[in-house]
């Protein structure tokens, strides 16, 4: 499952002049760029000072670990991934991840980790010994919940049965497998390194070693027909995965497909595919609980649920994002994106490239951007718990969305209507405006 990326700042509301988020790093931040940057302990102390918010409790905390290398960059991919040129510096990168995590500890003292997601890139390029070292470092530095969900992304073409048994022994208890399609023609169009046979073999290996795993598929692919999309979804369901992620192909900016757009199904054909997916997954006993996520009972993705419910996450590794709450403020961070720059700056003790506080005016949109992805919505008191604001702060937008038939709310629940789910971007835009 692709981790949720934070809202891009050029899409977020402009903070009020003079607010803590008005374009400058947070006070005491090592990203402030001064020669005598504050130590992590000093930064944590600055974040604990009185501020504009009053959070009654801190949300659950997750850990995201980014592995930035892959065998080949896919033409649709806009994530921070870089093709391996012969080899990658595994030992150096693992050392940087530990150093990065150690420097972040003062920001999360005393907080337990409930989920871990190792994403990329292709983390399954890591050696079994490398993954074991990473998990040992995490365990030695962080208190993990006894039932922590620990997910690792893996791509067919990098699957080896012995290696995945070792991954399981190191503590990985959930896999997210990037199948995308079982169709040879579509896999070639997507630039994938595996074929249909390798995709099926990967799922068999996952079945043999993990009782909890997710299959990623895409639809509305170049020249894909409704029957071809149906065949892919039926094949995935045939493996009885506990979780499915079914993504509509989008032509993201700054990708090969954006520069050289393929011929893809039109809106009507895409809508037919969505209806087909809804029917097949429902018949097979999957709950459609988020825009692209379908789960068997008790198998929702806990890590991604924490994103959608505006929980906290510490991100380490090249380009990783963090959202960390304190009693009086919420802080976002981004690590250096290019692997070389990340390694150099982490060695120098400054892995964070960007750091800023969210302004009060941003919080309503950021919360709703995530929570409105959930088909069943959220309890209204969650808004106050996660933002420190009353629900009245977004009352005008709620009324507007309700008047357009995009939103349902009562004294307890706020959720998108069926129309709101169909036009989710329009619904989210109301809260941005």
Image: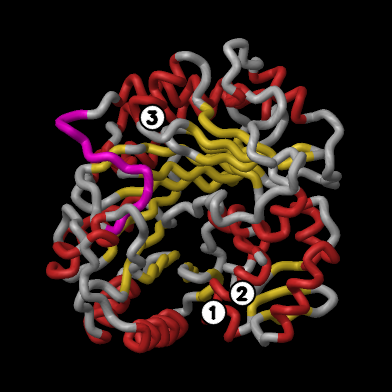
Q: Quadrant of the C terminus?
A: bottom right
Residue nearest the viewer, comparing 297 with 215: 215
Give the x, y percent position of residue 30: 60, 22
Q: Is residue 122 left or right of residue 293?
A: left
Farthest residue, direction top = 36
**How much space separates mark 1 and mark 3, taking CA atoms?**
43 Å
User: Mark 1 touching mark 3, by CB under 8 A?
Assistant: no
Give the x, y percent position of residue 123: 33, 41
Residue 194's label in the rendered image is none
Residue on which the image places disc 3: 132
Residue stretch in magenta: 76-87
Q: Secondary structure at mark 2?
A: helix
Q: Residue at x 46, y 69 (%)?
A: 292
Q: Is residue 319 above or below residue 217?
A: above
Residue 423's label in the rendered image is 1
Residue 211 in view (yes/no): yes
Give the x, y percent position of residue 195: 14, 60
Residue nearest the viewer, comparing 75 with 261: 261
Q: Secondary structure at mark 1?
A: loop
Earlier sequence position, callout 1 versus callout 3: 3
Q: Label 1 crowding class (10 Å Cα cut-off): few <14, some 14-19, many 20+?
A: few
Earlier sequence position, callout 3 versus callout 2: 3
Q: Is residue 78 magenta?
A: yes
Q: Residue at x 73, y 79 (%)?
A: 400
Q: Secondary structure at mark 3?
A: helix
**How much space separates mark 2 and mark 1, taking CA atoms?**
6 Å
User: Mark 2 touching mark 1, by CB under 8 A?
Assistant: yes
Residue on which the image places disc 2: 427
**How much space separates mark 3 and mark 2, taking CA atoms?**
43 Å
Give the x, y percent position of residue 203: 28, 59
Q: Label 2 crowding class (10 Å Cα cut-off): few <14, some 14-19, many 20+?
A: many
């Amino acid at each position: 499952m692709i981790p949720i990326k934070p809202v891009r700042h050029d899409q977020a509301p402009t903070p009020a002049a003079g607010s803590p988020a008005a374009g400058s790093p947070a006070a005491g931040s090592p990203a402030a760029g001064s020669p005598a940057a504050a130590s992590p302990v000093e930064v944590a102390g600055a974040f604990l000072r009185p501020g504009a918010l009053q959070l009654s409790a801190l949300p659950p905390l997750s850990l995201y670990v980014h592995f930035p290398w892959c065998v080949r960059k896919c033409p649709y991919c806009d994530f921070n991934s870089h093709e391996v040129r012969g080899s990658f510096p595994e030992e150096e990168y693992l050392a940087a991840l530990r150093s990065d995590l150690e420097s972040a500890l003062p920001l999360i003292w005393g907080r337990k980790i409930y989920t871990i997601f190792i994403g990329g890139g292709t983390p399954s390029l890591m050696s079994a010994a490398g993954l074991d070292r990473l998990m040992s470092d995490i365990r030695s530095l962080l208190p993990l919940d006894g039932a922590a969900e620990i997910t690792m992304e893996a791509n067919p073409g990098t699957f080896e049965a012995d290696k995945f048994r070792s991954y399981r022994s190191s503590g990985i208890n959930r896999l997210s497998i990037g199948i995308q399609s079982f169709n040879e023609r579509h896999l070639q169009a997507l630039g994938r390194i595996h074929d249909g046979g390798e995709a099926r073999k990967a799922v068999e290996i996952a079945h043999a070693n993990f009782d909890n795993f997710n299959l990623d598929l895409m639809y509305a692919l170049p020249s894909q027909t409704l029957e071809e999309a149906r065949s892919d979804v039926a094949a995935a369901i045939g493996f009885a995965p506990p979780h499915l992620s079914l993504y509509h192909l989008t032509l993201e900016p700054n990708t090969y497909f954006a520069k050289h757009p393929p011929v893809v199904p039109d809106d009507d054909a895409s809508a037919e595919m969505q209806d087909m997916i809804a029917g097949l997954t429902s018949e097979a006993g999957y709950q459609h609980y988020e825009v692209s996520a379908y789960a068997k009972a008790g198998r929702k993705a806990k890590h991604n649920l924490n994103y959608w419910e505006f929980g906290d996450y510490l991100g380490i590794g090249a380009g990783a994002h963090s959202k960390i709450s304190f009693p009086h403020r919420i802080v976002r961070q981004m690590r250096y994106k290019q692997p070389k720059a990340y390694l150099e700056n982490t060695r120098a003790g400054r892995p964070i490239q960007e750091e800023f506080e969210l302004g009060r005016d941003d919080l309503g949109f950021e919360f709703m951007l995530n929570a409105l992805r959930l088909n069943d919505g959220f309890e209204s008191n969650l808004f106050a718990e996660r933002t420190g604001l009353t629900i009245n702060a977004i009352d005008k937008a709620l009324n507007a969305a309700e008047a357009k038939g995009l939103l349902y709310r009562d004294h307890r629940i706020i959720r998108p209507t069926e129309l709101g789910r169909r036009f989710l971007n329009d619904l989210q835009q109301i809260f941005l405006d």
